[in-house]
Image (spheres, coloured by chain):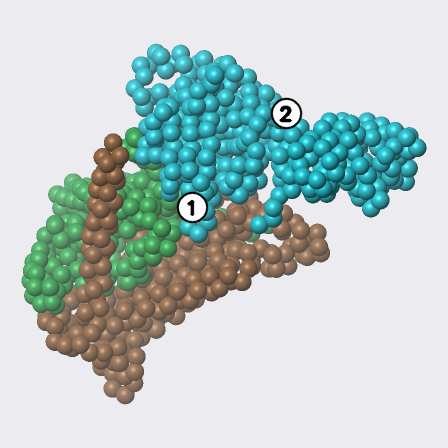
Amino acid sequence: MRRLRPYSIPYFIWMAIFVLVPTILLLFLAFSDLNLYRLSAFEFRFSNFTIFSEPFIQRALFNSFFYALIVTLISFLVGYPVAFYITTLQEKKKKFLIALLILPLWTNMLVRLTAWERIFSANSIFSDVFGLQIPILGTELAVVIGLLAMYLPFMIFPIFSVLDKLDTKLIEASKDLGASDTQTFLRVIFPLSLGGVVSGFIMTFLPSLTTFALPEVLGWRKVPMIGMEIQKKFILEGLQPFSINQGALISILIMLFSIASFVLITKVDKEGETLI
Amino acid sequence: MMVQNQIKSRVRKTSGLLITILTFLFLYLPIIIIFLISVNNSTRGYRWEGFTLKWYQDLLFNVTNPSSDLRIFREAIGNTIWVALRSTFFATLLGTIFAIGIHALDKKKRVKMMVLNNIPVVNPDIVTGISLMVVFSLLSFQLGESTVLLAHIFFSIPYVVLSIIPKLKRLDPNMYEAALDLGCSRLSAVWRVILPNISTGIIGGALIAFTMSIDDFVISYFTSGIDFENVSIWLYTKMKNPQNLNPTLYAYNVLIILITIGVILYINLKKDRKEKIS
Amino acid sequence: MSKKLIELKHIKKSFGDLTVLDDFNLYINENEFITLLGPSGCGKTTCLRLIGGFESPDEGSIVFDGKIINDLEPNQREINTCFQKYALFPHLNVFDNVAFGLRIKKVPKAEIEDRVKSTLKLVKLEGYSNRMVSTLSGGQQQRVAIARAIINRPKVLLLDEPLGALDLKLRQEMQYELKEMQRQLGITFIYVTHDQEEALTMSDIIVIMNEGNILQIGSPEDIYNEPKNRFVAQFIGESNIFDGTMVDDYLVKFCGREFKCVDKGFEENEPVDVVIRPEDFDFVPPSKAKIVGVVDSLIFKGVHYEINIIVDGHEYTIHTTRYREIGDKVGLVVEPQNIHIMKKEIKQ
């Protein structure tokens, strides 16, 4: 099959264009006064860094990291047991539950957001039908719960995928050698599931970090988050001088986290099996 | 000793079940709301005013006097579906070719290509969105339908590749050579021998690509410019007043879910039947 | 006198609709190398798993050292298993794999180091402590699996077709080593295989099983020389099996001729199965032989020739170092003590 290699070359070029070029461009934008819409002479400078001294941006950065971390931790504490439980079920039930888990993800994210908006409203179909009022729109709690609802499945899937592929003979071997259920879990099952755990963490943390529609709808823009700031800089205030440059700089910061995540994932799951 | 173990096991099973049920209820709460709104006989989502299918009727059948709102919405749906279909087609086509190419590489290069492949998957949407926006500006592309299509193809291909590579791995490596040995040209061997055996991967990949395209918001938002609207963007502009959202939107969503379920079930049944025969 | 270490009493085990073992009884002595031998699906692996605790019997009891252990979990039994595909922990290196059981028991660090070292020496893997198991060859992984099991000093070691994945030479080497190990350690080895040569090489006792039943138990020599029925005769070694009749005590008739034999106690003219091993035939000049035929085919097997001879329409397979051409007329002779008589099985 080696003769089929050339098929992959155009992909390399394609990816180079769409991944490497933008990154370089963003670097240029971030570290200079280049105007995206009127490409002309530019000079390198660090003035864009002043954006980080603005308290609003600082607050947004802090919030984003803080909430993303909380959401990821809760997702892990809830998601791991769920993934584990599902693997203990029979084949048919397993497939069914996983399909059930995927289903909500097929709905448009924004539509689900509006549904949550209804749930958190004082007066809506939710309160009418369920008789329960959860008026927390505009609060951090709403943002956190919303993020959980969106990204919890992304923690469950990779962990499930790895646990499901675990060789049951390894568990038998562990028991055979005298380990209790708990010891087997701590010494054999959990270490072997780390690949999925890391994947899950990343697939939950990164989107939570950079979300911007959610804090707008559920947080009423009262909760500063970095995603919204990037959106502002690029689109809403995109034509203001240096706005995109500043946005680019903030994005570079976020991208550093992305890159750290790739490195982690390639160490842990070389062929990307846990990503689907 | 035995009883202790039994109790421990029971407790574990029940708590596992409990936490799973709670999780599912939590995740399905918005779905239930979506469904309720779509059958609620009221234009403003304040109260339950009776069961009705009129939103579905309005969405699907109202050709005589659709409101301007509905017309724009339908146009957005049309855009969304048309982009999704083309994006799925090209992403699947290209993704299959690329997957075969990657699979044929030696281990080191393959790992490197897969890392590259996985970047759009791991990257948060917003980063991909602004990256693409920036590239398009650089290349002086006008932001609109074609850039959205390009963007969708871009982020869909990796999923297709991820879906096909495992199937390629399971193939007997000698099959391709057997085909060549029996007289096939390279292309013919791929067409006759490799493709039929990875068909589940291709279909799976196509499904994922379609779903990702239909539901995408962030990337479309950054790459669509001013004129082009798909459902997500249309919705975003209207989200300032969620109560006033036309319930046909929710009807649309429910329909999409049902259709996707239908397609999945159909494919699974076909697979089961194939397996029974063989 | 060996004492009974393990007893399986009236065991019944089913999987769904399939009953694998029914009223199964077996006892195993201390310090014995016992092999469960039989074709796939005969229940030997199920038997092993019941002893190890990975399955529970539907009915019956498993007795270990005088106590019923039906309800004991695998981690509570003083038994260790060597799995078919080794089941080594991929995230641990050789040292940690082998030390696993000791760490669970909270054995002090210094003692662990000592015991791992000496066990690795026993399985000829000194110096491999820090290797990751995925970098080892099949044979090496097999030894790690054995080391991991025996370091815990179990009373019984269960081995589930452990040598299946190895090539012939390696397998033969390991068979010898396993036998030596068992002798040195003084542990009971319960070995499961479908390879009869393996069983003959290593075991003190062989239990031949088919379809959940025990067909014969005995030492390798007993089973080889005195198979009790057709199945055992065909399963172990190669045989010629003929339909015959017991004309009288010490006299059997088959293939139209009467032969002296060493069995008695059958009814007059009782139909029996007559078993003669291929290596028990000898060539004699046709004029002096009771059995005369024509060579039909000839295969060189290194150690001997396998020659098929047609005698009055019956096919005799013999093993000999003497060469004959195809089409040669030959005479065969066999000694009375090499003619084994078995009761015919009642077909159900």
The circle on residue C221 is 2
| Within-10-Å neighbours for mark 2: few <14, some 14–19, many 20+ | few
Q: Residue A252, percent across and down?
A: 29, 43
Question: Is A59 situated above or below C289?
Answer: below
Task: State the CA–CA distance, disc 1 to disc 2.
Answer: 33 Å
Question: Is C44 situated above or below B148?
Answer: above
- Asked whether C13 or C140 is in front, the reply is C13
The residue sitting at 50% across, 59% down in the picture is B275
Q: Is residue C22 left or right of residue A139?
A: right
Q: Which amino acid, mark 1? A: Ser
Task: Identify the secondary structure beneath mark 2.
Answer: helix
User: Which residue is labeled 1 in the image?
Assistant: C14
Upstream in sequence: badge 1 or badge 2 = 1
- Asked whether C43 or A5 is in front, the reply is C43
Q: Residue A85, percent across and down?
A: 29, 46
- Colour in which chain C is shown? cyan
- Colour in which chain A is shown? green
- Asked whether C4 or B214 is in front, the reply is C4
Task: Identify the secondary structure beneath mark 1.
Answer: strand
The residue sitting at 23% across, 74% down in the picture is B248
Q: Which chain does brown denote in the image?
A: B
The residue sitting at 20% across, 74% down in the picture is B39
Residue B59 lies in quadrant: bottom left
Q: Is residue A23 left or right of residue C266?
A: left
Q: Residue furthest bottom?
A: B64
Q: Residue A182, percent across and down?
A: 27, 33
